[in-house]
Image: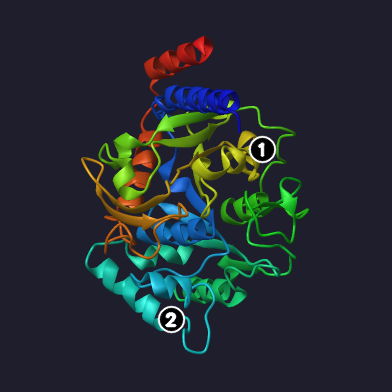
Amino acid sequence: MSGRRFLAGALTAAALAAAFAVRAAERLPALGVALAETSVSGVSSGAFMAVQFHVAHSATVRGAGVIAGGPYFCAEGSVLRALYNCMRPGRFTPLPATPALASFTTAFAASGAIDPPASLARARVWLFSGTKDEVVHAEVVEAARRYYLEFTAPANVVLVGSVPAGHAMVTQDAGNACAVTAPPFVNDCDFDAAGQLLAHIHGPLAPPAAAPAGRLVAFDQREFAGGNAFAASLADTGFVYVPRACEQGGCRVHVAFHGCRQSAQAVGETFVRDAGYNRWADTNRLVVLYPQTLARRGWSLGARGGFVMNPNGCWDWWGYTGPLYATKAGPQIRAVRAMLDRLALPEDRGQKTEDRGSDAKR
């Protein structure tokens, strides 16, 4: 590469970084969402996080969509168990027994670390395993189904396992070929996973919009992580999709957790724009929250220091943020709950006017 081309590339990168930094400064809006109608979903590590968040806050979260994910507390605080027992189980690395995981759940609830599992009796759960997925095996997703059946009725739990999809978010018409497992891990399978899971959790939906017409807000995540998102392997910036109908408050909220190597740091805004949620959100009064992780490798010094080994930007479902990772006190769960609490505050008209003014200047 010539010096001139290198300089041009560096300047372009710097300009993009500067533009992103300005975009990241926006404050997550207060929209008066109905917290009791909250739902969650995720892909891969995001699916494990969706299950964790659902179980930890089952009194608030009414249901979960689990795409290539497993049962609550599957890894039991061990990265090796996460990589083997809970992704590609074998003879010497079996999946944890379902009754044992249910016992952990009951014990955590008894200590106040998570909501009482009685709240899971009303849970609506939609699970998906692609037949071409060689990253998280089908038996792991089946284990998640068995886990939920410890607490809720069979009619509340659906498992789809017949689509020839790779390890990815499965969509109607966006992304890679269906059987592929490759970035950005969004696959065109002629199958609308977002619509299916939302309908199972929330009931019959109005048809989706032809194209998203709301606003995608990049917001500052740092305030929800004690000012130091980096310490919890969270990005400084998250995203929220706000339909026009939700600007006046009173909507539901869905939290969509991306997978490993699928954060904005890795694939830009592909997941938040193409995963398929936003068109459904527009016509069904649904705000979609897209929290974001950050890849980290080992030790960092200074105020943003500490040891975190998360090179693929995964959500913490094995304990890299500490032993409380699967409870309400887990740094990532606590941060996302704080985001939901902000969205639930009464609409801040003054802040929204200020934000719109800032948008107009950009």
Q: Which residue is mark 2?
A: 96
Helix, strand or loop at label 1? It is helix
Q: Position of residue 344 (x, y in %)?
A: 39, 36
**Residue drawn at the location 42% of the way across and 35% of the way down:** 237
Compared across the picture, whether 189 is left or right of 320 comes to right
Earlier in the chain: of badge 2 and badge 1, it is 2
| Quadrant in which residue 110 is drawn | bottom left
Q: Position of residue 281 (x, y in %)?
A: 60, 38
Please identify, in this view, whether the residue under mark 2 or under mark 1 is nearer the observer.
Answer: 2
Q: Position of residue 135 (x, y in %)?
A: 59, 68
- Residue toward you, 318 or 99: 318
Compared across the picture, whether 217 is left or right of 341 comes to right
Q: Which residue is mark 1?
A: 279
**Residue drawn at the location 30% of the way across and 57% of the way down:** 321
Q: Amino acid at mark 1?
A: Arg
Compared across the picture, whether 165 is left or right of 84 comes to right
Q: Position of residue 41 (x, y in %)?
A: 53, 54
How packed mark 1 is, by other alpha carbons closer than 10 Å (few <14, some 14-19, many 20 or more), is many
**Residue drawn at the location 37% of the way across and 67% of the way down:** 118
The residues bearing labels 2 and 1 have C-alpha atoms spaced at a distance of 38 Å
**Quarter of the N terminus within the rendering:** top right
Q: Amino acid at mark 2?
A: Pro
Compared across the picture, whether 331 is left or right of 122 comes to left
**Residue drawn at the location 59% of the way across and 44% of the way down:** 271
